[in-house]
Image: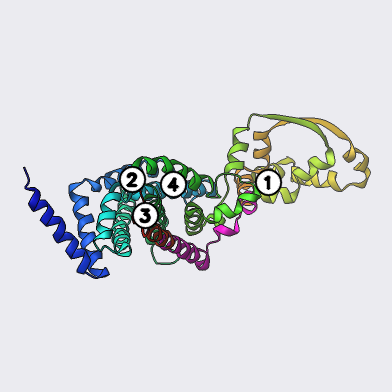
Amino acid sequence: MADPRNSKERTKSFRRKLRYRGRFAQVLIYLGKLLRMFIYQSDWKVFPMSALIAGLLAYVIRGDFAITMEGTLKGSFALACVCIWNGCFNSIQVICREREIIKREHRAGMHISSYVAAHMIYQALICLGQTVLMLYVFSLVKLELPAGGFITRWFRLDLGITLFLVTYAADMLALLVSAIVHNTTSAMTVMPFLLIFQLVFSGGIFSLPSWSAPLTKIAVSGYGLNCICAQAGYNELPMVAGWNTLKSMRKTRIGGEISLDQLLDYVSEEAGDRSELIADLRSTKVEGDLTVGEVIDFVAQDPNLEEQRQKKYAASVTVGELINLFGEEQAKQAITQSSGQASIRSRYERSVENIVDCWITLGVYALLYAFIAVLFLEFIDKDKR
């Protein structure tokens, strides 16, 4: 059984250290304490959890991330969600679980700014380790990523900076919540609402009313989503949802009335330049050197056949037959490009200013959350609970 006198002496000695040490020295003291907690209180378990989540994520988004608009948006949202999740779990309980200890040490001379600064450094190291581990797992799972970066020479480095900043900003937000609430039960009650807010108001996946625009400005996930989409070149990628829907309807039959004039337009010389199938049809010989194309052009231009060209006839055709008429590759290219042009978003612009602005905003939010946490903890001695 430990001698109570020795325990009291150790407590007095620690308080004397705090009382007569400067702020920087206190940061080192608490940083050492946090590192010991990492080893002996199993805080290292956040790393295998991050690796598992990263592996599942890579399996889900591989194949279309940075290849199509839909895949890039889906993958960017998933990456931002994982970073928010990791950051919140890192620090949601770290302050509230030792609130009574903080009170005693603050009265013994602990500077709140030193205490929070030690947590900021410690959590930055945790977030950095999680980011490096995520990128390593992506390589193991063979998630295809662009080779060249836009800000740096390597895309993985650009992406890593974004993932770290999103994780760290979410970490500092959870640290703020931990500084405000008074116990771990309250912290874990608040966290689901925190996560839901970040996911819903990311501004990329869910259609939001106009009044919610200010809320998207304070969501860390929104800046992470915008930055990842911009880095992956969202606006330069094709939109394939429309083409995939059209392909699934190949056997669908559509009907209506069509005039001979309209039909001749579909098999004109210009249409033959766009479709290999029509070009082959037009080059088919019907008699001697006479081709189908020449017959079509004669019927289309002969003024004596004007009345016949205006007559309408009942027609029925499948979607697949229409695709073949125009040429599958030409139809695919036209639909994906036009869909992509209609889906361009300014906040996903692949520019240095856009990406750096997101990085700066995430960094500012992280510092702001830490500063507010200091303000709340400065009044910890007045807490009667």
Magenta region: which residues?
339-367
Task: Choose top left, top right, bottom left or bottom right for residue 380.
Answer: bottom left
Between residues 74 and 250, which one lies in front from this camera angle? Answer: 74
Task: Choose top left, top right, bottom left or bottom right for residue 57.
Answer: top left
The residue under the point 40% across, 67% down is 152
Q: Name the residue under label 3.
A: 382
Residue 147 seen in the current view: no
Q: Where is residue 322 in the image (x, y as percent from the top left)?
A: 68, 37
Question: Badge 3: few (under 14), some or many (20 or more) residues near its Cα, within 10 Å?
Answer: few
Between residues 162 and 278, which one lies in front from this camera angle? Answer: 162
Find the distance from the CA under tag 4 to the CA under tag 2.
19 Å
Q: Name the residue under label 2.
A: 141
Q: Do the residues labelled 1 and 2 touch (CB within 8 Å)?
A: no
- Residue type at mark 1 is Ala
Q: Is mark 1 on a helix, strand or loop?
A: helix
Task: Please state if 229 lies on the left or on the right of 241 as rendered.
Answer: left
- Residue type at mark 2 is Val
Q: Is mark 3 on a helix, strand or loop?
A: helix
